[in-house]
Amino acid sequence: MAKTIAMLTGGGDCPGLNAVIRGVVRSATSRGWRVLGIEDGFDGLLTHGRVRQLDRKAVRGILQLGGTILGTSNRGDPLHYPVEKDGRIELVDVSAKVVENFNALGADAMIAVGGDGTLKIAQRLFELGVNIVGVPKTIDNDLKATDVTFGYNTAVGVVTEALDRLHTTAESHHRAMVVEVMGRDAGWIALESGIAGGADVILIPEIPYAIDKVCAAIMARKQRGSRFSIVVVAEGAFACDGGKITKGVNRTGVERLGGIGQQVAQQLSECLDMDVRTVVLGHLQRGGSPSPFDRILGSRFGVKAVDLIAAGEFGRMVSLRGRTVESTTIAEAVGALNLVDPDGEMVVAAEKLGIMLGR
Ligand code: F6P
């Protein structure tokens, strides 16, 4: 039977979102279904007129584009929606309104593409009776219910290229170059790009670092004739005698990480007899064209999400297990973080390669 499905992208953007949108539209329309695109995440369901039909023409030429043609927002969380009351901003649960507005679209099902926050909202809407399917995204690769998220591979590529470029200038000037990368509480981006980019030191949240050990490692390198060092620091990393560095919270109360690169650089310049510079790669890691891996994974996730709707399997999220796209319940997926195992094979391999992990 012909169906109408609505889809949205929520939370921070990430390379590969457009591949998911295209995958959903191509596979749904080939079944004779109609696809509605909701603009700017759940925000688009709270304000009228922000829904448009997506046909094959609307998704032409978007596979290689970063970002999301639907727009996104990490401010319109309906579970904690900012509402002004008596001159003050209060966070209230407006999920019932989202359900009402979704029902008014006349759609049979919804696909929500997003990270942990978006999936938590999806689970709530499912409990309120919405036929919903989730698609996980994040450059951080920190969701447990899938082996990998799309966007991550592109981010690792961006950081690796940056490290390659920083190597030549660090070596020419005999400097220590501290590179702060994203990842929230997971050190995946730092660890994998650090290995790929030949970093000398990698600091991740899962292994609190001792600055004296980092200094000793850089000095030992200098004594061996390597008068420069590349230090990759995950934004969530912290010293064993310190805490996470934050830049306050965003409008929905989520902590904004950042600033640890500057702190590590300061600490290093106090103990090293060499110039130290800091580079914060920031949102460059989320921008630009998705890698072939992320285009393929995003496309497969989009197709699988439509298959789940066709099979009436709601409250589920697509996931990659090994080399196969499968699904799991959204309830199981949310809140379970995929963190780097400090004693796992990847960390041990990095240490055997001579990379200093701060311990
Ligand atoms: O979750 C993706 C991510 O890029 C994190 O790595 C980073 O901490 C955060 O989003 C930045 O969020 P914003 O775009 O709101 O600054």
Image: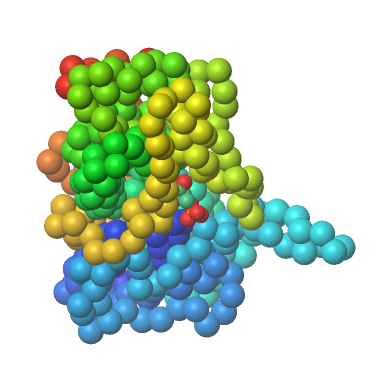
Residue name at image x 26 percent, y 47 percent: 169
Q: How many numbered marks, from 0 up? A: 0
Residue name at image x 60 percent, y 45 percent: 247
Judge whether 223 appears above or below 63 on screen.
above
Quadrant housing the N terminus: bottom left
Question: Residue 31: which quarter of the image?
Answer: bottom left
Judge whether 52 appears above or below 133 on screen.
below
Instruction: Check the image and name the residue furthest to the right.
Output: 86
Viewer-nearest residue: 175 or 286: 175
Residue 337 at x, y = what percent?
40, 33
Q: How is the image coloured?
A: rainbow
Residue 167 at x, y = what percent?
23, 42
User: Looking at the image, can residue 109 be seen?
Assistant: no
User: Looking at the image, can residue 71 be seen?
Assistant: yes
Residue 340 at x, y = what percent?
33, 27
Judge whether 345 appears above or below 180 on screen.
above
Residue 93 at x, y = what percent?
66, 54
Question: Residue 211: which quarter of the image?
Answer: top left
Viewer-nearest residue: 184 or 331: 184
Residue name at image x 50 percent, y 63 percent: 73
Viewer-nearest residue: 105 or 167: 167
Q: Answer with left or right where residue 312 lies relative to residue 233.
A: left
Q: Answer with left or right where residue 43 lies relative to residue 56.
A: right
Question: Residue 200: which quarter of the image?
Answer: top left
Quadrant housing the C terminus: top left
Residue name at image x 87 percent, y 63 percent: 86
